[in-house]
Image (cartoon, rainbow, N blue to C red):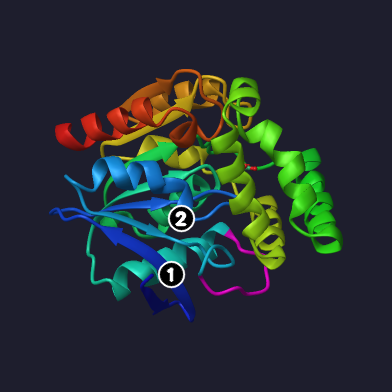
Amino acid sequence: MPTVHANNIDIAYNDQGSGDIPIVLVHGFPLDKGMWEPQVKALSGEFRIITPDLRGHGESQVTQGPYTMELLADDLNGFLDALNLQQVVLGGFSMGGYAVFSFYRKYPERVNSLMLLDTRPQPDSEDGKKGREDMAQLAEREGAGPIAERLIPRLLSPNTVANRQDVVNTVNAMITNCPVEGIAGDLRGMALRGDSSDLLSKINVPTLIVVGDQDAITPPAESQSMASIISNATLVEVSGAGHISNLENPDEFNQAIHDFLHHH
Ligand code: MLT
């Protein structure tokens, strides 16, 4: 797996296919670039798909947290520099989307178009912030196992949990392989994130919004609301999918990305 040095850390990534404007897909919490496997398979015949591991995840370097969304945005900016990419189609899943909002605020000139995937602009509530700290401490005390147990029923739809053991296993493996510093760094960084709602009306690039119709973490209503504010937005609701809609229903998810990339 190739690695580049960017923003003072080593960032591992996968880079497949070719095309004029590369597509960079940013994974969520507490996952890694492996979450994009069905997209890389389906789309890299036509497009160049680049999937980095965020700091503290997958094969990228681990640092002490908190990983603020601004820090992750700076990592991505350094990553694009290291790969010599001026402009990209930038997609972020959930926490990856929070980082993409920060990136768009700081480096809008590098964004050809946006994909906001099972994500939302609002910060955490006070209760939510407390829950993040509790979970960070649980990870530090007991490791990633209990984090996977707690998250999987929220990340995936009940039907996926009951009937798609392959998807459950994939997600479980990503979470249990995630370094504890990465889990805690994300949680404390997400708790610190600001509100990106004001940014929505300023987004002036074509934007694809995708959400699982049973997403319990970033529900469809949030995506509908983003689609009504962003001036050039396309909204796709993926059927029979919870939060990790790209793994739960890859066919519909990939079709949405495919159609978007062909129209812009
Ligand atoms: C994610 O999928 O990245 C996280 O679940 C997002 C969150 O907890 O807010």
> Residue at the right extreme?
141
The crowding category of the residue bearing disc 1, from other C-alpha atoms within 10 Å (few below 14, some 14 to 19, many at least 20), is: many
Residue 241 x, y percent position in the rendering: 51, 24
Residue 89 x, y percent position in the rendering: 27, 49
Residue 59 included in the magenta stretch of the image: no
On whether ligand 1 comes within 8 Å of the CB at mark 1, the answer is no
> Residue at the left extreme?
20
Q: Which residues are magenta?
A: 60-68
Front-most of residues 144 and 109 = 144
Residue 61 included in the magenta stretch of the image: yes
Q: Residue at x 54, y 20 (%)?
A: 221
Q: Are marks 2 and 1 in contact (CB under 8 Å)?
A: yes
Q: Quadrant of ligand 1?
A: top right
Any part of residue 30 in sight: no
Q: Which quadrant of the view contains residue 126?
A: top right
Left/right placement of residue 70 relative to residue 47 reads right
Residue 67 x, y percent position in the rendering: 61, 63
| Mark 2: amino acid | Lys
Front-most of residues 77 and 162 = 162
Any part of residue 225 in sight: yes
Q: Which residue is the site of mark 1? A: 12
Numbered disc 2: secondary structure: helix
Q: Which residue is the site of mark 2? A: 33
Q: Is residue 193 above or below residue 195?
A: below
Q: Which quadrant of the view contains residue 160?
A: top right
Q: Residue at x 23, y 54 (%)?
A: 22
Left/right placement of residue 151 relative to residue 254 reads right
| Mark 1: amino acid | Ala
Q: Residue at x 64, y 28 (%)?
A: 161
Q: Earlier in the sequence, mark 2 or mark 1?
A: 1
